[in-house]
Image (cartoon, rainbow, N blue to C red):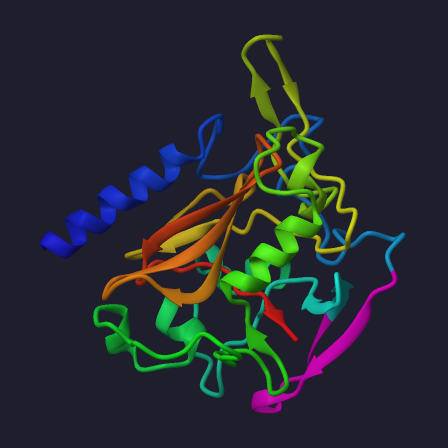
Amino acid sequence: MKKFIASVVLFSVLLVGGCGDSNPTGGGGGENGGGSDFTPGSQFNTKIMYGFFTDTRGGKNQTYHTVVINGKTWFAENLNYAGVNGDIGVCYDNKADNCTKYGRLYNWAEAMDIDSKYNNELWGGSDIDHQGICPEGWRLANNADWNNLVFTAGGDTTRSPDGGTGKLKSKIGWESAWNAVLGQEYSGNGTDDYGFSALPSGFSTVGLFGNIGYNGYWWSNREINATGAWNRIMRNHHGEVTYSLSDKVDNFSVRCVQ
């Protein structure tokens, strides 16, 4: 019960943490925001030359867009692999359509492809070239990968809706944000200069879901203690990428890198 209460408190903190979110549980969106009502695949930048990779695991062919950014090849979309038995990760709101749009959400042990006990125990392994749940030849992005990506896109301190690391956000799919000074909405979308095409896939914890359309959360493969690991967050109301510590049992998105 204590664990459940703590998780619910964390859920509330994550929702509140997306400051400026007018409706953190998703849906709607102003005409400038794009919102969560978009066709899967339409988020990709038509000016970028993408590659493609097909994951054949489990007898199911899942093809992903890939993109080269500063010498590293990234998935240009979130991983959508459910395992051989279809029981790894969750779809937002438990709806398959959301997996098609945003990929699956994984707890940290699932993302790492290690025993679930390490969501509550110190794993202590190396984050160097750790494959995790990614396909053969790919690996779960580590902090160095994320740092390289964010640095390439201009750093993580520029709080502009269309600048800084807003260059990593998709041109569509993000809910609009509210400018209290001007008294009007502005677009939550990015410019997607590098074809990373990040979408606000939200998160889940203890069966609760939040922030789809507003925030995106991605695991790194570095733990900080027995129950916490590092992740990155993008939000609709500014362009920066936040470096954050989260509970390993939370379910976030995964990006694979070579």
In-image side of 40 versus 242 (left or right): right
- Residue at left 62%, top 63%? 100
Decide if residue 9 is on the left or right side of residue 189: left
163 shown above or below 66: above
In the rendered image, residue 146, in percent from the top left (x then y), is placed at 57, 58
The answer to whether any part of residue 107 appears in the image is no
Residue 18 colored in magenta in the image: no
Q: Residue at x 31, y 82 (%)?
A: 115
Task: Based on the picture, tell me whether residue 59 belongs to the magenta stretch.
Answer: yes
On screen, residue 71 above or below 17? below
199 relative to 53, above or below = above
- Depth check: give the residue in front, 202 or 71: 71
Q: Start and end of the magenta stretch?
A: 49-64
Is residue 160 in sight in this rendering?
yes
Q: From the top left corner, tell me how far across and down residue 14 is, in percent.
A: 36, 41
Residue that sits furthest to the top in the current view: 182
Q: Quadrant of the C terminus?
A: bottom right
> As drawn, is 17 to the left or to the right of 32?
left
| Residue 108 image position (x, y, % from top left) | 38, 67
Q: Position of residue 60 (x, y in %)?
A: 63, 85
Q: Nearer the viewer, residue 113 or 29?
A: 113
Q: Is residue 112 left or right of 148 when viewed as pictured?
A: left
Find residue 57 and report its image quarter.
Answer: bottom right
Of 12 and 219, the residue lying toward us: 219
